[in-house]
Each structure stands twice: as C-alpha cells, then as structure tokens.
Amino acid sequence: QQQVKQSPQSLIVQKGGISIINCAYENTAFDYFPWYQQFPGKGPALLIAIRPDVSEKKEGRFTISFNKSAKQFSLHIMDSQPGDSATYFCAAGGGGGADGLTFGKGTHLIIQP
Amino acid sequence: GAVVSQHPSWVICKSGTSVKIECRSLDFQATTMFWYRQFPKQSLMLMATSNEGSKATYEQGVEKDKFLINHASLTLSTLTVTSAHPEDSSFYICSAPNRVNTGELFFGEGSRLTVL
C-alpha cells in the first residue's frame, strides 16, 4: 500500500480553539480523501471527505483543505469542543473510495475544557 | 444512511480454536468488502479484500490460510481466524463501499478478539 503520512501524533487544544491535523499522500491515483473519527472501542465513522476537484470543503465546524500539487490535505475543527476528543484518521484511496483506503497513523486529539 | 453491521462485537477464545466474524451490509449490496485489523493505539491496516463470487485478495504478509474469508452473498462476508493465537488478539473491522449511492466506504463497529 502507498503510504499516507499524518501529523501530529497527538494534539491538545483548548475548548473553542482550532484543531488542525495534516496529511500527505504519495499515490497520484488517489481520488478520495476522507477523514474518520474514532472513539475507543468503536469502529471509525466518516467525518468529512473531499475529492481532488475542489480545494476546500466545509461541513459545520469541520473543514478539509486540499492541495493537489503538494499532495497534502488537512482537517480543521473550528470551535473545538470536549466531545471532539477522539482519534482522527486521514485516509486516501482510488475509485472514489470503492477500491479501499490507506490510512494515516492517526492523531489523538484532546480538547481541554 | 448506509449501515454495516458486525457480529460478534467482542469474543474471547482459547488458543488453537477458530473464530468467525460476520460483516453485513444492511441496506445496500456490496460486491466488495474490506477487512482491517487494528492493534491498540495503532492505525487500521488492510488485511484483505473480500469479493463476492471469487477468492479474496490478501495484502502482503497476511496469511490466507489463517484468515479465511468467504463472501457468501452480496450482503455478507465472513472472516474466520483459524487456530487462533494470543498474537491474533486485535480489533477487526470490516467496511463496504456503497457503490450505488456515493461510493463512500462505510465501516462496521468492529469485533474485538481476545485469544487466551
């Protein structure tokens, strides 16, 4: 599998602040870039996803920024809340995601009240 | 939205026994399902791709004789861990793409296997 590099490994943000997680990929054939949120003991849940034809996608407090030339994408969580504390995984895949995904190593996010 | 269900959610077995985990797509048909393994505080690693009507495709380093995959129907894939050992203890997660609608990949809740 092609590698997807994710940083930081862990992140502590104050309530109300902006959480930023970054990912970089290698395979230019990837055309689907989702972010997943995972709570302990649960399967990952799709948070937001972007395709390479747009540079930004926003859904509520969550925004993905995508830089195709740099092969990088990032997740921004605005007005971070304690309930956002979880592990976040970026992923990338081809076939619009239907060909399977390669995951980043994850970011453990803690929002301090 | 599309739902993928796994069963059992957790299982404890003795070393040397076999364990079967089921993955079902509840409201859509899935010709392909993916099986991932996740060790504590680590990322999801793709184990194999389950294909309805044909053999599964395994990732490099995954023993196909140990992790048996059967895609019995368009809504069911099973993973059998044969002759389980303590090092097989992990969180196994399946996923399926909803090709009819958005092509997004939906994940099950996972199955935690503990081998004693």
Image: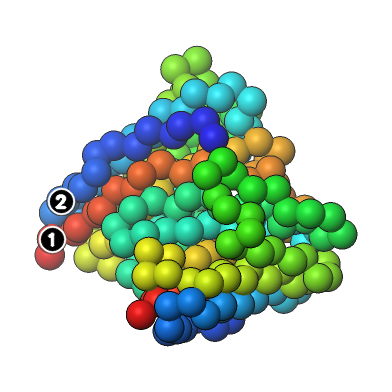
Q: Position of residue B54 (x, y in %)?
A: 84, 55
On the same chain, marks 2 and 1? The answer is: yes
Please tell me whether residue A56 is drawn above or below residue B19 in the rendered image.
Answer: above
Amino acid at the residue labelled 1: Gln
Q: Nearer the viewer, residue B38 or B86?
A: B86
Relative image position of residue B14 (x, y in whole percent): 43, 83
Horizontal and vertical percent position of residue B104: 65, 52
- A17 vs B106, nearest the viewer: B106
Q: Is residue B25 left or right of residue A61?
A: right
**A95 relative to A101 in the view: left or right:** right
Which residue is disc 1 drawn over?
A112
Calculate the distance from the C-alpha at mark 2 to the C-alpha at mark 1: 7 Å
Q: Is residue A42 left or right of residue B77?
A: left
- The residue shown at (53%, 72%) is B83
Q: Position of residue A4 (x, y in %)?
A: 44, 34
Q: Secondary structure at mark 2?
A: strand
Mark 2 residue type: Ile
Q: Residue B14: tell me if it is visible.
A: yes
Q: Which residue is situated farthest in the right direction here?
A: B53
Residue B115 versus residue B90 in the image, above or below = below
Residue B94 image-quadrant placement: bottom right
Q: Secondary structure at mark 1?
A: strand
Chain holding disc 1: A
Q: Which mark is residue A90?
A: none
| Residue under the image location 48 percent in, 58 percent down | B37
Residue position for label 2:
A12
Horizontal side of B69 relative to A102 (left or right) equals right
For residue B19, above or below residue A103: below
Placement of the C terminus of chain A among the 4 image quadrants: bottom left
Asked whether disc 2 touches disc 1, contact meaning CB atoms under 8 Å apart, the reply is yes
